[in-house]
Image (spheres, rainbow, N blue to C red):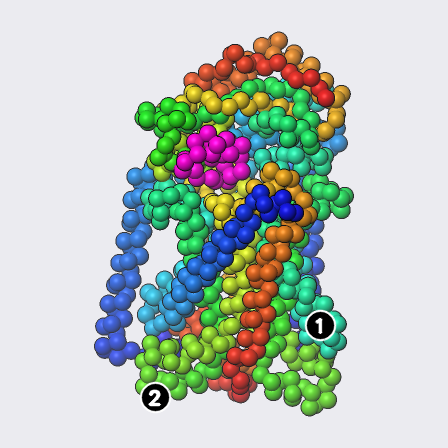
Amino acid sequence: MKVRQFSAIAAASVLALGLTACGDSASDGGGDSASGGGGDSSGLKIGIKFDQPGLGLKEGNDYTGLDVDVAKYVAKELGTEEGDIQWVQAPSAQRETLISTGQVDMIFATYSITDKRKATVSFAGPYFIAGQDLLVRADDSSITGPDSLNGKKLCSVTGSTSAENVKKEVPGVQLQEFGTYSECVAALVSGGIDALTTDNTILAGYAAQDQYKGKLKVVGNTFSEERYGVGIKKGDTALCEKINTALTKMVDSGDWQKAVDDNLGPAGFKVDTSKNPPKFDTCP
Amino acid sequence: MGDIFSNYDVLGAFWWTIKLSFFGGLGALVLGTIAAIMRVSPVAVMRFIGSAYVNIFRNTPLTLLMVLSVLGVTYILGVTLADDINQNALRWAMVVLAVYHGAFVCEALRSGVNTVPAGQAEAARAVGLTFGQSMREVILPQAFRGSIAPLGSVLIALIKNTTVAAVIVQAEAAGLMQRIIEFEGGSFLIFAIFALGFVVLTMPLGILFTSMSRRLAVKR
Amino acid sequence: MSTQSVLFDAPGPRARRRHAILTVVGVALLGILLWVVLRKMQSAGQLNPALWEPFLTDRSVWRDYLLKGLWATIKAALISIVLAGAFGLLFGIGRLSQIAPIRWFCGVVVEFFRAVPVLLMMIFAYFGIYTRTDLFSASTAPLAAVVTGLTLYNGSVIAELVRSGVFALPKGQGEAGLSVGLTPSQVLRSVQLPQALTAMLPALIGQFVVILKDSALGYQVTYPELLTWSKTLGSAFSNTVPAYIVAAILFILMNYALTKIATVVQRRLSRRGRAVIATPGQVAETVQQESTMAGEDGVQTDATKTGMR
C-alpha cells in the first residue's frame, strides 16, 4: 500500500516536471520576451514598455506607440526587418539590468538620459525631449501647474523620477504612489485623486485613449526636461553612431514628425518645437 | 554600510514593519477566530459566509488585494481611513494584512479543532452546554493549543508579507529597500541588511512557537 | 440530513427560530454590502459595459494577455510545487534525524528560509546571482528566480509541516513501533510519516495554494505572470480595475479548484484505509457535509472509530 502511494507521488512529480519541461521548450522562441517573429539569433531584441499608451503598448499581438515606431525605423536602418524584432518588456526598474545582462540589445522605453544611468549604460539619441506635466480631469480648471497643487491629491509611480521631482517641487503635496500609471488614471477618472504627474508624452498617450477621450486633459505647464535616449550596452560607440545616423535620417525624411503626430497628436498634445526634434549627444 | 544607515531611516522602516505586523496580526487573530466559529456554527448562512470569506481571501494574491484596497476601495468606493494619503495607505495595508491572514488563522484553528477528540464535544453537549459555551469552554481552548504551530507560521508569514505593502506605500522595509536600490544600486550588502532584519524579527518567534507547540500540546 | 455535527444538538423550536433570525440578518447584511459596492462602482463609472465587454467579446483579451499570464503562473507554480515538496520532505526528515549534526544543519536552513520574505529572496536570486552569472539563460533567469524563491520558502514551510505532523501523532504510535522491534528510522518511515503526511494534508494543500498565489510576486523580477499581463491588459483596454477583478477571480477559481482536487485525492486515500487518523476527532469521512465538527473534513463513522482508538 505504502509503496503504491509513494510511487504514485513520484509518478505525479515526474509528470509535472515533464509537463513544465515541454512548456519550456515550446515557448523558448518567445518565452518571457513575447517575441513577434521567429528570427532566432539574427533578430534584434528591443526593450519597450508594454503598458504605455502612445509610447509603447501591446495591443493584441501588435505593438504601438512612438517608442515602437522609432525602434522599428532604427532597426530597419540597422538591417533588421520588423518581423525579426523580438519585443521585450522593459519595466522602468529593470532597464539597466536588461541591457547589462544582454537580455536586450536596445531600449526604447521613455528612457531619460541621466548622468547616473550613464554610469551603467550608454545612450544614443535623444530622439525626443519631453517634460514632466500634470494630467487632470477635463472639467477641472483649478490645477494649472505645480503651484496650484496644494491640498490636492496627486498620483505617480513608485520610485519614479517624476515622483521624486514633485516631492522636491511641492514639498507638502499629498502623493499616492502606485505600481503603474494605469492605476493612477483609473483613480483619476473615478475622482479619487485630482492629478497624475509624469512625462507629458505618457500623459498625452492616456488622454488619447478611446475610453478616456474628452475626460482628461494635459495641463501643458512642464516643469522638467526628460531627454529620451536609446539605451545600449555601455561603451558600444559603434552601435551608438549607427543609431544616431538612423535617427538623423528619420528626422530628415519626415518620418519622425509623422510618428510623433500619429502617436501623440490625437489628444491635442502640442510638441515643444523649441526643443524638438532634439540635437543628439555625442557618442561616448 | 554606515552611509546607508545615516542616509536612510532603516530602523524607522522596520518600525513600520513591526507596527504593520502587530496590528495586522491582532486583526487576523480576531477575524480568523470569528470565521472559524462561523464555519462550525449551526446556522447554514453563517457557515456559508465563513467559508466564502476563507475561500475568497485565501485564494487571492496579496499584491492584488493591496492594490485593490487603495485603488478600488479608497478611490473608487470612496472609503478612506485617514485624510493623509500615506496614513490611509498604511491603514489599508494593516486591514488587508488582517483580512488576508485571518483566512489562514481560520484554517489553522480548524485544523486545531480537528485535534480535539470528538468525545470532548460529545461530553460538553452531554452536560448541557450550548454551542457557544462548548466552543468557549471546551473546544477553542484545546484548539488554540493544538494549532500553536500553524498559528506561528501564519504570524511569521504575516511579518514577511508586510513587504508586499510596498506596492501601495513606501514606509516599510521593502519599500525603503526599493528606494535605496533605486538610488544606490543593488548590492549584496543592502540585501543582507534587510534579510538580516527579517531574520531578527521572525527567528525568535519561530523558536518560541516551536517550543510552545511542544510544551502546550494537549497530551493524549 | 441525518449527518449532524458533534458540536451542537439538533435545534429545538427556540433554537430554530434563533437560527432563522440569524439567517435573515446574515443574508440582509450580505445583500446590503453588495448593493453599496455596486452603487459606488456605478457612480465611479466602473460598471460601464465598455470596460467589461472585451472579456466576453474580444478573443485577444484571453489569447494575448490572460491565457499567456495564466500559463506562466501555472508553469512557475508547478515547478516550484514539485521542488518544494522534495525540499520539504528531505529537510523535514532531516530535522527528525537521529544524528545531531544533520538535525542541526537542517534546522538552521529551514529556520533561515522561513525567516526571509519570498520577495527579498526572489530579488536577491535574480539581481544578485542569476543576472551576474550564466547559470541560466537570460530568458529563463526570471522564471528561475521565481522558482528559487518559492521553493526555498515553501520547502521550508513544508519541512516544518512534516516535523510538526510527526510530533502531533500520539506517542503510542512510535512506542508501539519500537516495541515490535522496528528501528527508529523504520518507525519514522513506516509508522509516523505516512500518518503525519495524511494528517497534514489540509495544511499542505494550503501551502500549494500559497505557491500558486505567490508566483504573482514574479512581476517584481520581470517574470510575466497573470498579474503582470492583467496590468498590461488594463493599459491597452483602459480597464485597469475590471482587469484586476477578473485576474482575482481567475486566481480564486484556480486555487479553489486546486483545493477541491486535493480534497478529493485525500478522500480517495482515506477510503483506501490510508487516512485512518490516529488523532481522534480528525475524522475520516463518509458524507461530505459542512455541518460536521470541522466543516469539510466530514463525519466520523463507526468504522473509523474502531480503527482510531
Residue B101 visible in the current orientation? yes
Q: Is residue A185 or residue C265 the one in the foreground?
A: A185
Q: Which residue is at a point 58% across and 80% down the rendered structure image?
A: C169
Q: Which residue is at a point 67% across and 24% down the rendered structure image?
A: A123
Residue depth check, mark 2 versus mark 1: number of the one nearer the observer: 1
Q: Is residue B124 or residue C124 the one in the foreground?
A: C124
Q: What element carries label 2?
A: loop
Magenta span of residues:
A156-180
Name the spot of residue C291 as percent of width and height, x first.
39, 73
Q: Mark 2 lies on which chain?
A: B
The amino acid type found where label 2 is placed reads: Val
Relative side of A246 to C245, left or right: right
Residue at numbered disc 2: B127
Residue at numbered disc 1: C103
The amino acid type found where label 1 is placed reads: Arg
Q: Is residue A172 magenta?
A: yes
Q: What element carries label 1?
A: helix
Relative side of A221 to C122, left or right: left
Q: Is residue A244 or residue A150 the one in the foreground?
A: A150
Q: In this view, does B218 lie above or below B40?
A: below
Q: Which chain carries label 1?
A: C
CA neighbours of label 2 inside 10 A, class few (<14), some (14 to 19), many (20+): few
Name the spot of residue C286 as percent of width and height, x first.
47, 76
Q: Is residue C216 magenta?
A: no
Name the spot of residue C131 as percent of width and height, x first.
71, 42
Q: In this view, does B171 lie above or below A143?
A: below
Relative side of C182 to A52, left or right: right
